[in-house]
Amino acid sequence: MNNNIVVLKFGGTSVATPDRIRQVAELVLKKQQKGQKVVVVVSARAKMTDALIEDARSFSSDPAPREMDMLLTSGERISSALLSIALNALGAAAISLTGSQAGIITDDDHTNARIIEIRPARVVQALADDRIVVVSGFQGVSFKKEVTTLGRGGSDISAVALASALGAQVCEIYSDVDGVYAADPNVVRDPAKISELSYQEMQELAEAGAKVLHPKSVEFAKVKGTIIHAKSTFVADGEGTIIKNLEGRIKPRVVGVASEQKVILARCRDEGHAGVIARLVDSLAEANVKVKQISFSEVGDGVTSGNFIIAEKENYHIESVVPRLEASFPGTLHVSRHLGAISLIGAGINDRYDFLRDCLRLLRQEGLGPASLHTSSFRISALVPRDRLDHAVNLLYEHFLRSETKNDAQS
Ligand code: ASP
Ligand code: MG
């Protein structure tokens, strides 16, 4: 019944200038003229969020998370109001809503809140009144009535979660690239575009650093099988990439290589069962640090060695946390900040040894370690020197993906 609702999400570069906002407004209007009920979700204008974080850091290296949320949500609010004004100027009837007004309810984990429920009554009413609804992405409201943000890149989560809650079949994610590529086009020359991806592959690619889509958004798409269509605002009729349920229909493959520059490796040694690792976990939790991966194992003689991988971008206060941790764990904690993470992604990647063996051989031949390696059923991830990360990405891309015809997803 709701099948003619479509949710469109526009990233920061798509709303960066008045001309671009006008271009977006025209695109949105065309959708409405096709008879669709349109909900638009927007990000803050390009570089705005970074600039606001810099502003906050000029006062404090450890700003209160609640205040960061008050600050950062303003970026998306500007975009939604401007787009709504632009749409109305073109003769449409548009209304902008904050995340809170759109009914996006989250937990109270400031700067990294989770959507727990969507009550889109106002959105539904506005659509029934034939309005175009423009929602500020990246934000919600907690049950304590505080404004929250969903983590960097979180407008994608707002869009897909709203699409799912409204029963839209498709959520179109518009950015300045025409879909998802097998590697970052800023790092690898002319990488192939992926035409179809499974939810899990997309989620893993995004978690490993591919920037087109927030990994958590995929979780919301899975709930009702909402199809995500990633495409370009600026390439009319570009095909983009379709992300949908392909589970169980793919033969083992490598679909992409992704990387993340700024990761911190914290190594920790616990001698004689002193509980150092558990205490480090406590400290990280207390300092509200988002950790990407934790692993530890006994290495003999009552010594346990632990690895904690932390992404810098998800932790606004990292510069004050690292020295504090180092001071609290003298001699037992060693923090490396010269590494980057590289990942090969694909369904069934660990069903066979050859992907891992080739990966290890290539990295070793080039003297790239790795400093640590981790596999899962969709991923092989390694830490290599940060200053040679782009080289490593090219190396793996050329070997695994350059000559492949990757676009035949289904066997
Ligand atoms: N403006 C926010 C950020 O830069 C959210 C988003 O762009 O999706 O992280
Ligand atoms: Mg984004």
Image (cartoon, helix red, strand yellow):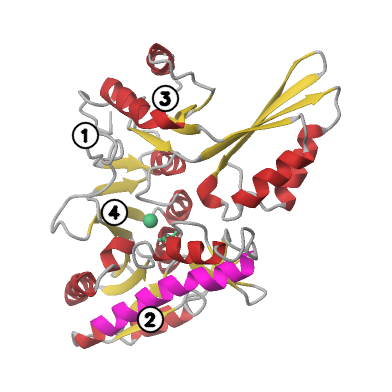
Q: Which residue position is annotated with label 2?
A: 96
Q: Residue at x 34, y 50 (%)?
A: 212
Badge 4 density bin: few <14, some 14–19, many ≥20, Cα 10 Å: many
Magenta highlight on residue 81: yes
Q: Which residue is mark 4?
A: 229
Q: Are marks 4 and 2 in contact (CB under 8 Å)?
A: no
Q: Viewer-nearest of labels 1 and 3?
A: 1
Could you tell which of marks 4 and 2 lies nearer the N-terminus?
2
Mark 3 against mark 2, which lies toward the viewer? 2
- Residue 380: which disc? none
Image location of residue 92, percent across then percent down = 23, 85
Residue at point 19% right, 72% down? 19
Ligand 1 - quadrant of the structure image: bottom left
The residue located at (76%, 29%) in the rendering is: 332
Callout 1: few (<14), some (14-19), or many (20+) C-alpha neighbours within 10 Å? Answer: few
Residue 107 in sight: no
Q: Earlier in the sequence, mark 3 or mark 2?
A: 2
For mark 1, give the secondary structure: loop
Tag shown at residue 189: 1
Q: Secondary structure at mark 4?
A: strand
Q: Looking at the image, do the residues carrying marks 1 and 3 touch, with CB atoms under 8 Å apart?
A: no
Quadrant of res 204: top left
Q: Earlier in the sequence, mark 1 or mark 3?
A: 1
Stretch of the chain drawn in magenta: 65-86
Q: Which residue is mark 3?
A: 349
Question: Based on the displayed image, in which of its 4 quarters is residue 291 positioned?
Answer: top right
Instruction: Determine if the C-beta at disc 2 is less than 8 A from ligand 1.
Output: no
Whichever of labels 2 and 1 marks the residue nearer the N terminus, that label is 2
Residue 370, relative to residue 258: is it above or below?
Answer: above
The residue mark sitting in front, 4 or 2, is: 2
Q: Earlier in the sequence, mark 1 or mark 4?
A: 1
Which amino acid, by three-letter code, is at mark 3?
Answer: Ile
